Image (spheres, rainbow, N blue to C red):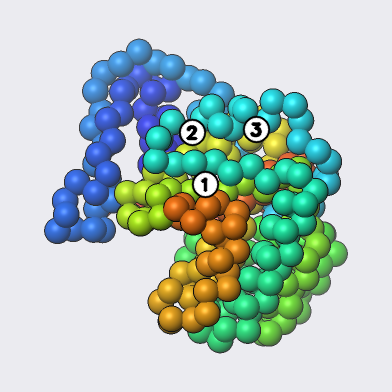
């Protein structure tokens, strides 16, 4: 939302100055944006905002197009954020294997599984009431699965976990490359916000190019779990291998050419979120 606001302001003739975490005593106030008059600059990223959706379907397992890595790196304007490009067959296989393993760990962790399940909206009533979370339409399943899934009612937690695990083993780890955005090892909330803005910028650019992206943060989620519960640092070590001992993975995702268009997820209207 923050990156979208900056891009939209520029498109409508306003310059946006962003201050992250402006009040130390109020961590819920993540940013303050000061708008001043400026020259309108409506670029392709602004036009992509309304079309940007997370595509959880299958992507073409084809090599990345020439110049793709360089184009993404050019959009990373924060010196504290690094982009790690995993496109060789060996690195892609390693990331895929470990992401599947991290997903297995999540679905076998009752607390993490329940926390994820609370964000799933199945019925039209759930969607209309909450206007957030994930839905069956946005999972990347085919038309038959979506149609019968809605008719059969909300799946159990175990059934939903099996669907997610199967998707991770299959279509949701296809694509041209995997990418990790990292910050310094001692991560802060500001680092997270910076990485989040850059991810949104990358996704908007990818949308404008006809590419799809999907976050795959299972490894980072398990790293957080290992730290909070003092567990064996299994996935912490995996991430250190991928980004370096001195870096902290913030956003992990895949990129590629999708076979199908993504459905939009429900979003809350502006009146619900304005204070």
Element type at mark 2: loop
Cα distance, mark 1 to mark 2? Answer: 9 Å
The residue tagged 3 is 69
Element type at mark 1: strand
Q: Pick the residue in front: 208 or 142.
A: 208
Cα distance, mark 1 to mark 3? Answer: 13 Å
Q: Quick check: 105 above or below 270?
A: below
> Where residue 230 appears, x then y in whole percent?
43, 81
> Where residue 217 appears, x then y in whole percent?
57, 60
For residue 242, say whether it is visible.
Answer: yes
Quadrant containing the N terminus is top left
Q: Earlier in the sequence, mark 1 or mark 3?
A: 3
Considering every residue shown, the one lying at the far front of the view is 245
Q: Which mark is residue 76?
A: 2
Q: Earlier in the sequence, mark 3 or mark 2?
A: 3
Q: Measuring 49% from the left and 81% from the top, which residue is drawn there? A: 231
Element type at mark 3: helix
Contact? badges 1 and 2 (CB < 8 Å): yes
Q: Measuring 72% from the left and 51% from the top, which residue is drawn there? A: 91
Q: How many marks?
A: 3
Q: Quick check: 213 above or below 143?
A: above
The residue tagged 1 is 181
Q: Measuring 60% from the left and 54% from the top, which residue is drawn there? A: 242
Label 3 Cα neighbours within 10 Å, binned few <14 / some 14-19 / many ≥20: some
Q: Quick check: 253 above or below 41?
A: below
Q: Quick check: 173 above or below 83?
A: below
Q: Pick the residue in front: 242 or 16.
A: 242
């Amino acid at each position: 939302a923050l990156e979208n606001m900056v891009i939209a302001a520029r498109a409508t003739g306003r310059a946006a100055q962003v201050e992250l975490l402006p009040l130390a005593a109020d961590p819920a106030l993540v940013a303050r944006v000061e708008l001043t008059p400026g020259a309108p600059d409506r670029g392709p990223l602004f036009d992509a905002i309304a079309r940007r959706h997370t595509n959880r379907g299958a992507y073409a397992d084809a090599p990345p197009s020439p110049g793709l890595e360089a184009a993404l790196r050019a959009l990373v304007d924060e010196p504290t954020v690094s982009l790690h490009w995993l496109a060789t067959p060996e690195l892609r296989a390693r990331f895929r294997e470990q992401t599947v393993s991290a997903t297995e760990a999540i679905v076998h962790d009752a607390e993490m599984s329940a926390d994820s399940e609370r964000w799933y909206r199945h019925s039209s009533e759930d969607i209309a009431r909450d206007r957030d979370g994930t839905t069956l339409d946005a999972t990347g399943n085919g038309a038959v699965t979506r149609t019968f899934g809605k008719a059969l009612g909300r799946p159990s937690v175990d059934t939903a976990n099996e669907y997610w695990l199967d998707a991770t083993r299959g279509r949701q780890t296809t694509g041209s490359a995997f990418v990790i955005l990292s910050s310094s090892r001692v991560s802060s909330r500001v680092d997270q916000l910076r990485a989040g803005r850059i991810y949104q910028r990358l996704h908007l650019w990818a949308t404008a190019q006809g590419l799809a992206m999907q976050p795959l943060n299972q490894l980072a989620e398990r790293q957080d779990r290992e730290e909070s519960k003092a567990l064996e640092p299994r996935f912490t070590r995996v991430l250190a291998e991928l980004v370096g001992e001195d870096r902290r993975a913030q956003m992990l995702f895949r990129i590629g050419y999708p076979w199908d268009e993504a459905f939009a997820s429900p979003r809350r209207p502006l009146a619900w979120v304005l204070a």
